[in-house]
Image (cartoon, rainbow, N blue to C red):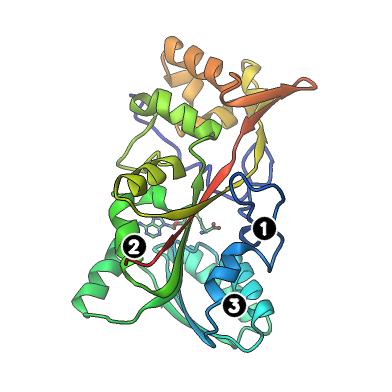
Amino acid sequence: MVQVRQKASRRSVSAPGGSDVSPGVGRLSPVGGSSPQTSPDSPLLHDIIGNGKSHLNVIGVGSGAGEIDLEMLSELRLKHPRVTVDNEVVEPSSTELQKYKDLVSQKPGLDYIKYNWNQMTALEFEEQWKVKKMTKKADFIHMIQMLYYVKCPGATMSFFRSLLDKNGKLLIILVSGESGWGKLWRTYKNQLCNSEISQCVTTGDLKSLLDSKGVSYQSYELPSQMDITECFTEGDEKGEMLLDFLTEVMDFSKTASSELKAGVLELLRHPDCSVESNGKVMFNNNLGVIVVDQLT
Ligand SMILES: C[S@@+](CC[C@H](N)C(=O)[O-])C[C@H]1O[C@@H](n2cnc3c(N)ncnc32)[C@H](O)[C@@H]1O
């Protein structure tokens, strides 16, 4: 395995390839559904706020700088202008948390939200919750592009699911199992994934886990593509950065064996991972969305 990895993230809103991979939670399109739903009438928002509550307990896990959290809460508020929100934010990075607080202080009209800032990991939050014997229940819990960073995504998902109130929803977004990432990781997990840093987990893996436990869920796909054409030009600076980003290995082209490099490059432009059109290689960067109900 190539040991040196960079902290590049397929999970950021914009990738080196320049494509927008923003989850756009208000615009979910059900798998197999014929037409995309538009906010704020998406089935997800209907499910969450359709229970007539005037106060919602929300938990954001790995909220980062909070842009997406605020977008979702604004959509909830649009639909239910009188709703008030108690918002637990779980975010270990002090930098990200500060950005979130700055965003809240700059944005007008957020006084319907009461914030509880928890600068800690999901696991630390879980431990604290148990030590304090908390009984508070949540109407909406979201984990957007963060389950890669916990040691055991399945256990974390189960704990937070156990906090859901009646009709509560747990929303998880990760790269889709059907994406190029899924194919790349299924083929080269042993060579590329360093589980000390992050888990190469997709919504496909979580769905298999939920299926094995007989848990029902709703799932959606959020289409996204990333232009990775430069990866295939030897020595191209942007291409090398993209390759590092895709493999999460620092200086991949210089440090990987020629066999691994050739295999990864071949797979990246294979139809399982990318489509080629007009001289461009477009990597399938689809995100998957899973919505799980409370434990019954
Ligand atoms: C890719 S960002 C996603 C941020 C935000 N949810 C979004 O979609 O814009 C992943 C976030 O998870 C946070 N994170 C990393 N490890 C975590 C952990 N163990 N528990 C909770 N959050 C974690 C990171 O600090 C980062 O803010």
Task: Name the residue tied to disc 3.
Answer: 104
User: Is 41 or 74 nearer to us in this picture?
Assistant: 41
**Is the residue indicated by label 2 positioned so its CB lies within 8 Å of ligand 1?**
yes
Q: Amino acid at mark 3?
A: Val
Q: Position of residue 9 (x, y in %)?
A: 51, 44
Residue 182 or residue 38, whichever sits in front: 38
Q: Amino acid at mark 2?
A: Ala
Comes first in the chain, label 1 or label 3: 1
- In the image, what residue occupies the spot 70% across and 52% down? 36
Q: Amino acid at mark 1?
A: Arg
Asked whether residue 59 is in view, the answer is no
- Give the Cα separation between the discs numbered 2 and 1: 27 Å
Is the residue 55 above or below the residue 2 in the image?
Answer: below
Residue in the foreground of this view, choosing between 218 and 130: 218
184 relative to 23 in the view: left or right: left
Up-down: is 15 above or below 231?
A: below
Q: Position of residue 157 (x, y in %)?
A: 35, 57
Query: Which secondary structure, mark 3?
Result: helix
Q: Residue at x 37, y 42 (%)?
A: 208
* Label drawn at residue 122: 2
Quarter of the rendered structure image containing ligand 1: bottom left
Q: Quadrant of residue 99?
A: bottom right
Q: Is residue 40 left or right of residue 213?
A: right
Q: Residues within 10 Å of mark 1 (few under 14, many from 20)?
A: some
